[in-house]
Image (tube, rainbow, N blue to C red):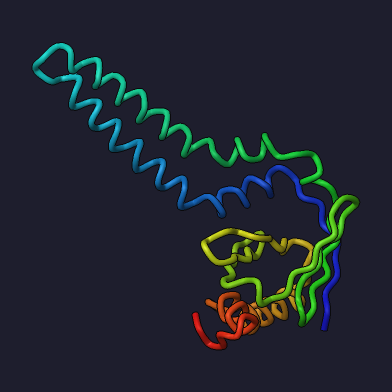
């Protein structure tokens, strides 16, 4: 079986995608923000008067980190080029996935992906190192197509698949 559909992203979809793919980074920023804000608040009540300056600097830095964690999805979408929101035609089959648009043509084998994350609005395909490579929107899929795609992804996308395939090509079959 093969699936082919056309989908045009909008800014709301792009924000959901950015929230899903930047979760770890936003948690890290929020953690730094909480620590810097706490240290800054603690330093502002310190005994030597000059420590208040360091406390205010820490407090300011903490607030910047916290705001960055909150605003990151909107910043990513606001900085995305217009080409990101053009219509893409997706062709999905047993061998891999192709994306076609007026400016982009790409095909990737399933072995390039080491993990898949299922979200309400899309499937996220990940490569080694946690890099979110591609998304497959679920809105244009029928329930039958969605079930078939979920089964295909579960069968074809396996942790370590890209490393194993690369090792086999270099004569190191089975080496992770």
Q: Position of residue 115 (x, y in %)?
A: 57, 71
Residue 33: x, y in percent?
35, 36
Q: Name the outermost residue toward the right.
A: 102
Q: Where's residue 87, x and y in %?
A: 85, 52
Number of numbered discs on residues: 0
- Return the residue nearer the eye: 6 or 40: 40
In the image shown, does 120 or 86 lie closer to the viewer?
Answer: 86
Residue at point 77%, 46% (across, down): 84
Outermost residue toward the front in this view: 171
Drawn side of residue 90 relative to residue 157, left or right: right
- Whether 123 is drawn above or below 51: the answer is below
Name the residue at the left extreme.
47
Q: Quadrant of the N terminus?
A: bottom right
Res 37 → quadrant: top left
- Looking at the image, which residue is at 56% across and 54% down? 21
Apparent side of residue 43 relative to residue 118 in the rendered image (left or right): left
Give how far across and how far down residue 20 sits, in percent: 56, 54
**Residue closest to the far top:** 49
Give the residue at x 30% y 26%: 58
């Amino acid at each position: 079986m093969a699936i082919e559909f056309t989908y045009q992203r909008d800014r709301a979809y792009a924000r959901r995608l950015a929230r899903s793919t930047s979760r770890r980074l936003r948690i890290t920023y929020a953690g730094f923000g909480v620590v810097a804000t706490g240290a800054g608040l603690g330093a502002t009540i310190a005994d030597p008067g000059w420590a208040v300056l360091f406390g205010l600097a820490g407090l300011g830095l903490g607030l910047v980190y916290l705001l960055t964690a909150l605003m990151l999805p909107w910043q990513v979408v606001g900085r995305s080029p217009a080409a990101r929101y053009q219509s893409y035609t997706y062709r999905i089959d047993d061998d891999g996935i192709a994306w076609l648009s007026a400016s982009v043509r790409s095909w990737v084998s399933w072995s390039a992906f080491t993990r898949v994350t299922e979200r309400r609005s899309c499937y996220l395909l990940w490569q080694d190192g946690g890099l979110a490579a591609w998304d497959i929107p679920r809105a244009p899929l029928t329930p039958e197509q969605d079930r078939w795609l979920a089964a295909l992804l579960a069968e074809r996308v396996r942790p370590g698949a890209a490393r194993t395939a690369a090792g086999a090509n270099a004569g190191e079959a089975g080496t992770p």
